[in-house]
């Protein structure tokens, strides 16, 4: 009997109900209702016409999202980290130098990744509550002559937004490419890939795009494409942008199979992009700026301190907030989750134990959500005992 050969017993996997929370951390975000629906669209073969039409819609949506005319734009199977890995491993070879403008955890991750590929990763650091100015970066470009500069646009570990204007030109003057992480900024904060001279960018579906994690948009400029075509090294097979460009029909003459992308995730990303196109980017940017400004004002009126001192450095999608003295961050977050059904996050990397990270983005970017969070935060202050100092 075959059942005799089964030595590992049947595990108990029962039905489970999961409470639906209002997800107001730095990601993941709740889904647009239309995206939830899109996830149930039919599974398609990776070689049928409909599959390629979805890819084309996604590519057009991404060109709008990144504000670029480039051909080399597509989405990678995997979360934002897959985009990070694709960009770094395709653009920079072993022993080449990548300069990292470090102010939060994502820059630290980029350093970790680059090091694994034998890239000579060097850092310039600033206090995590601030952002870079062009002079600081120019000094380092001059010193290191790197293949590329890595910088994070919106940093969800610190709640800062980096001004990128003029940075592309500056990098190009020193022969460097400009790589930008826009995972938590794209859609919620103005971003102009072509105008700002950005050479490689990656994002994620799960933040202001209000989709499920697992598919990561990327785009490369002409300059980056030339560097990729000249490269001597081999990036990982799964993330090889030259092969993926063939699968995504980036040049209009190839429809090949590289790997099976997840059709539900493609349907979902397509739908997120559609949601943003209907609203238009300028309107959506404006909405994030207005709602977050309202949120910050109400926080300050109620005795909370914002971690980022300068208003122009504050990110419109994720706000970092310091609790009044004597409150325990973990206890505070748990209270709000259990009593208000809202999920806030604590600090990460440089902000661990020092602040809350509150995301108001995508489908959740409404005045009602902002007010509900502030009200829950005030209630938690009243009801939680301060820990003895
Ligand atoms: C969330 C986040 C990431 C990581 O994205 P995953 O989808 O979790 O892999 C990278 N960069 C920034 C700025 C982020 O906020």
Image (spheres, grey):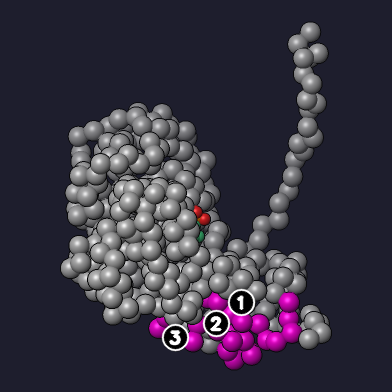
Q: Closer to the N terminus: mark 2 or mark 1?
A: 2
Residue located at (67% from left, 79% from top): 377
Residue located at (47% from left, 46% from top): 78
Report the side of 17 relative to 351 (left or right): right
Marker disc for residue 311: 3
Residue 23 lies, with reference to residue 247, above or below; the image says below
Circle 2 sits on which residue? 307
Residue 308 drawn in magenta: yes
Residue density around tag 3, few if under 14, some if 14–19, many if 20 or more, within 10 Å: few
Residue 363 lies, with reference to residue 233, above or below; the image says below
Residue 219 drawn in magenta: no
Report the side of 70 relative to 338 (left or right): left
Alpha carbons under labels 2 and 3: distance apart: 10 Å
- Mark 2 or mark 3, whichever is nearer to me: 2
What's the magenta region? 299-328
Q: Is residue 289 visible?
A: no
Circle 1 sits on which residue? 355
Residue density around tag 1, few if under 14, some if 14–19, many if 20 or more, within 10 Å: many
């Amino acid at each position: 009997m075959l059942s005799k050969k089964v030595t590992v017993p049947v595990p108990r996997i029962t039905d489970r109900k999961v409470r639906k929370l209002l997800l107001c951390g730095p990601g993941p975000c709740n889904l647009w209702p239309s995206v939830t629906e899109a996830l149930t669209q039919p599974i398609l073969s990776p070689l049928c016409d409909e599959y390629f039409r979805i890819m084309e819609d996604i590519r057009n949506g991404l060109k709008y999202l990144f504000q670029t005319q480039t051909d080399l734009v597509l989405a990678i199977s995997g979360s934002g980290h897959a985009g990070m890995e694709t960009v770094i491993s395709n653009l920079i070879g072993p022993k080449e130098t990548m300069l990292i403008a470090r102010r939060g955890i994502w820059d630290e991750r980029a350093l970790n990744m680059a090091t694994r590929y034998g890239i000579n990763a060097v850092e310039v650091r600033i206090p995590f509550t601030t952002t870079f100015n062009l002079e600081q970066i120019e000094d380092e470009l001059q010193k290191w002559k790197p293949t590329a500069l890595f910088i994070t646009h919106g940093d969800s570990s610190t709640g800062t937004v980096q001004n990128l204007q003029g940075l592309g030109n500056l990098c190009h003057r020193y022969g460097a490419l400009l790589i930008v992480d826009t995972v938590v900024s794209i859609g919620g904060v103005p971003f102009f890939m072509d105008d700002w001279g950005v050479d490689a960018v990656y994002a994620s579906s799960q933040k202001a795009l209000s989709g499920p994690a697992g598919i990561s948009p990327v785009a490369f400029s002409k300059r980056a494409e030339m560097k990729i075509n000249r490269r001597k090294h081999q990036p990982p097979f799964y993330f090889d942008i030259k092969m993926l460009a063939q699968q995504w029909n980036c040049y209009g003459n190839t429809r090949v199979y590289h790997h099976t992308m997840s059709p539900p995730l493609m349907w979902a990303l397509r739908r997120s992009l559609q949601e943003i196109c209907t609203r238009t980017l300028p309107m959506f940017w404006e909405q994030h700026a207005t709602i977050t400004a309202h949120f910050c004002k109400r926080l300050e009126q109620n005795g909370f301190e914002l971690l980022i001192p300068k208003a122009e450095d504050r990110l419109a999608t994720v706000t970092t907030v310091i609790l009044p003295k004597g409150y325990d961050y973990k206890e505070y977050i748990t209270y709000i989750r259990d009593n208000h059904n809202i999920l806030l996050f604590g600090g990460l990397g440089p902000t661990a134990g020092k602040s809350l990270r509150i995301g108001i983005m995508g489908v959740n970017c409404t005045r009602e959500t902002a007010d509900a969070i502030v009200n829950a935060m005030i209630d938690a202050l009243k009801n939680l005992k301060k820990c003895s100092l």
